[in-house]
């Protein structure tokens, strides 16, 4: 079994030597246990803060421990009545090629084949998709005709936020890095507009795309983008704070101006709060099915960037935090 562990805590951007590939034999499974071979690994922004020593909403990864992450795995051996060889599941395996789970493990879900590609259960039909969907609907509470803005618009969370808001009849404006991503967000995903925040004209471009101001800002990135959005926030607006990836590599988190600062000092204050996708854990199966069916029918569009082989996960992860990914960043581990 090859796995990637935390070798030392990164200072700022991930450097060579922070993560380490190690190899060890897969042990025999015991009664009640299940052996999974990992097929696809998901790379997600939240993994970066977990490499730091500070306690956030989740514990830091320990030195020498496998990097956390969700994957799609196939049962290759089972000593549990709950799983049969060949079953496909989503599982928090971490960055490794095999993993052993108890037959009654929580947060392991069997994948029902409804025609959605397997790896989409890590993207738009998986955790990021549910995040976008629930955060928008329950915290953003958009109404038809309102203006919804979301950044990291071509990524899996933003993709679902924007397409769901369009389905609800909103005026939807994406923000993304570079003309290629912006064109895709409008032409393929069907947003009304998409602003390239790297083009150097963010305030004016955003104001032009949001002539009636902003009613819902789904916060994925923070930083300069959030400051530009804040200038256009309408009274009564809602700001679901999902994450702020612009700060994830910051060396000193205490110096970061977070979205809580940016939106908390507005007058009137928009309704803003941080949420975790797990708040709607009871709706996991229902929402996964809804999104997977939309993927299968072609209603929910998405894109993905695939790195091949576990050894290429660190480079792909580093790139994702800088926007090198186009759509969901995945690692293909096995067929
Ligand atoms: P993405 O696949 O969209 O990847 C991150 C993207 O962020 C990059 O591709 C890049 O896109 C953009 N980005 C990076 N740096 C900046 C910057 N300085 N300013 C603006 N944009 C930047 O990620 P996901 O869709 O997986 O996740 C989106 C957000 O959702 C993250 O903040 C993540 O932490 C959060 N999240 C929160 C969850 C929760 O439960 N609260 C659960 C899951 C995700 P571009 O090229 O367009 O700049």
Image (cartoon, helix red, strand yellow):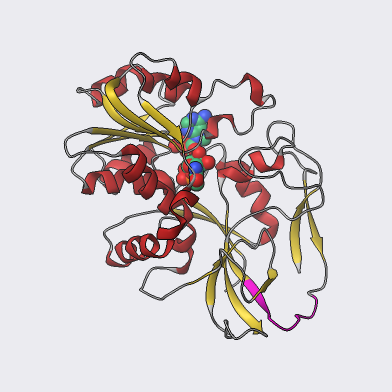
Asked if the magenta segment contains residue 33, the reply would be yes
Answer yes or no: is residue 97 visible: yes
**Residue depicted at x 42% and y 75%:** 112
Q: Is residue 69 left or right of residue 110?
A: right
Q: Note whether residue 184 is visible.
A: no
* Residue 233 placement: quadrant: top left
Q: Quadrant of residue 38?
A: bottom right
The residues colored magenta run 27-37
Left or right: residue 1 compared with residue 264: right
Q: Does 40 appear in magenta?
A: no
Say if 78 sits above or below 43 in the image: below
Residue lying at 48% horizontally and 55% vertically, measured from the top left: 127
Q: Residue 108: percent from the left, percent from the top?
A: 56, 67
The front one of 41 and 49 is 49
Is 172 rendered above or below residue 266?
A: below
Residue appearing at x 34%, y 44% in the figure: 138
Q: Which residue is located at x 58 percent, y 66 percent?
A: 106
- Quadrant of image for the C terminus: bottom right
Along the line of sight, the residue nearer the viewer: 51 or 3: 51
**Where is residue 97 shown, x and y percent of the image?**
68, 67
């Amino acid at each position: 079994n090859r796995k990637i562990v935390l070798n030392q805590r990164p200072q700022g951007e991930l450097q060579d030597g922070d993560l380490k590939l190690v190899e060890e034999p897969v042990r025999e499974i015991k009664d009640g246990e299940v052996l999974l071979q990992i097929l696809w690994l998901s790379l997600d922004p939240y993994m970066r803060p977990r490499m730091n020593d500070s306690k956030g909403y989740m514990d830091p990864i320990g030195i020498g421990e496998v990097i956390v992450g969700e994957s799609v795995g196939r049962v290759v051996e089972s000593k549990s009545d709950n799983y049969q060889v060949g079953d496909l599941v989503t599982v928090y395996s971490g960055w490794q090629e095999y993993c052993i789970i108890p037959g009654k493990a929580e947060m392991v879900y069997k994948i029902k084949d409804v025609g959605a590609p397997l790896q989409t259960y890590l993207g738009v039909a998986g955790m990021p998709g549910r995040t976008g969907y629930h955060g928008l609907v329950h915290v953003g509470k958009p109404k038809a005709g309102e203006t919804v803005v979301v950044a990291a618009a071509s990524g899996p969370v933003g993709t679902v936020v924007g397409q769901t808001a369009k389905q609800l009849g909103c005026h939807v404006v994406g923000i993304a890095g570079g003309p290629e991503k912006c064109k895709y967000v409008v032409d393929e995903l069907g947003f009304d507009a998409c602003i390239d925040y790297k083009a150097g004209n963010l305030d004016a471009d955003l104001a032009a795309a949001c002539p009636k101001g902003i009613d819902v800002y789904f916060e994925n990135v923070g930083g300069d983008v959030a400051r530009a959005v804040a200038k256009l926030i309408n009274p009564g607006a809602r700001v679901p704070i999902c994450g702020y990836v612009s700060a994830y590599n910051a060396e000193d988190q205490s110096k970061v101006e977070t979205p809580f600062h940016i939106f908390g000092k507005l007058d009137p204050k928009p309704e803003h709060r941080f949420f975790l996708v797990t708040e709607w854990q009871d709706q996991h199966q229902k929402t996964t099915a809804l999104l997977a069916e939309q993927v299968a029918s072609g209603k929910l569009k998405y894109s993905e960037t695939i790195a091949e082989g576990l050894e290429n996960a660190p480079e792909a992860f580093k790139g994702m935090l800088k926007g090198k990914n186009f759509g969901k960043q995945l690692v293909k581990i096995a067929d």
